Amino acid sequence: MTGSKKARLYPASLDLRGRPVLVVGGGAVAARKIALLLGAQASVTAVAPEFDAAFKTLRCWRGAGGTLEERAQLRQVRRQFRVSDLNGQSMVLAATGDLALNRRIAEQAKRRGVWVNVAAPGEAGNLQVPAALWRGPLCVAVSTSGASAALARTVRERLAETLGPEWGQLATLLETRRERILKQSAEPGRRRRLLRRLAERRWARLIKQYGPRRVARDMDKLIAKSLRSGQGGSPRRHRGTKQG
């Protein structure tokens, strides 16, 4: 059996807040990609002769309180792609139905040193977008380095069966508590031990069984005890619950 000679891709999560991103294409594929970009608060320009009906839903989203809020900036330009559209862009996504045009966009973007993702053919770009599973702030990304987008989706679906909403709730609890620990504990070793204990998978099981509020109280007790004593400590055992 021989392995692939392709270079292994470097996984990364990008902070696109306010960054200019160009999407060339007006179909359903482009709309799906733009939805993810707007969720990341990118400043998106979409260029296409016509836009799919799916674009009408990209202007707003349901916030945490269930109210409609404005998404990050989306500008739609109804015309054919121009090479000058690439100027000043941080990233480019080529999502037209014209393979030759997608290749040309990718070539021009790479000449300018701009990262470019191509819907098809994927190998024309230098940026692969993984299949992502979201559980609150927790994101699990799956990539096959361009070998098979279908396989990446299959693996994501398998992970979705394993990682329930309690994992997202755990990540949310840890987000604020991590900041508190970093501020209140000056000793790096103590911080690491405590953060590792709080990230153990047993917390997700306890959230699923007892709910996040009860687990949040146990976490806070552990943090307070650790900060007082300088020891990592262990979470309080719930009656009838085996931990480990």
Image: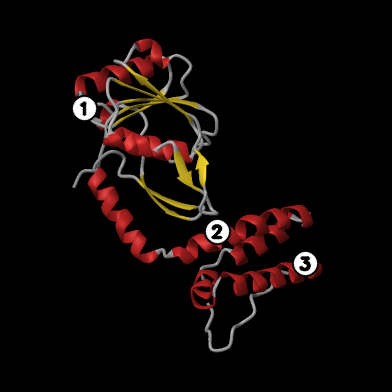
Sequence-earlier tag: 3 or 2: 2
Q: Residue at x 46, y 20 (%)?
A: 89
Q: Residue at x 38, y 14 (%)?
A: 111
Residue 171's mark?
A: 2
On the image, the x and y values in percent for residue 36 come to 41, 40
Closer mark to the observer between disc 2 and disc 1? 1
Mark 2 to mark 1: distance in Å?
Answer: 39 Å
- SS category of the residue bearing label 3: loop
On the image, the x and y values in percent for residue 158 come to 31, 60
Sequence-earlier tag: 1 or 3: 1
- Asked if residue 96 lies left or right of residue 111, the reply is left
**Number of other residues with Cα within 10 Å of mark 2, as a class: few under 14, some 14 to 19, many 20 or more:** some
Q: Tell me, yes or no, if residue 7 can be seen here.
A: no
Question: Please, is residue 201 above or below residue 21 in the view?
Answer: below
- The amino acid type of the residue labelled 1 equals Gly
Q: Which residue reaches farthest bottom?
A: 240
Closer mark to the observer between disc 3 and disc 2? 2
Question: Please, is residue 164 above or below residue 16 in the view?
Answer: below
Q: Which residue reaches farthest right?
A: 228
Q: Tell me, yes or no, if residue 94 can be seen here.
A: yes
- SS category of the residue bearing label 2: helix
- SS category of the residue bearing label 1: loop
Sequence-earlier tag: 2 or 1: 1
Residue 230's mark?
A: 3
On the image, the x and y values in percent for residue 58 come to 40, 37
Question: Please, is residue 111 above or below residue 231 in the view?
Answer: above
- The amino acid type of the residue labelled 3 equals Gly
- Asked if residue 45 lies left or right of residue 7, the reply is right
Which residue carries the number 1 mark?
97
- The amino acid type of the residue labelled 2 equals Ala
Closer mark to the observer between disc 1 and disc 3? 1
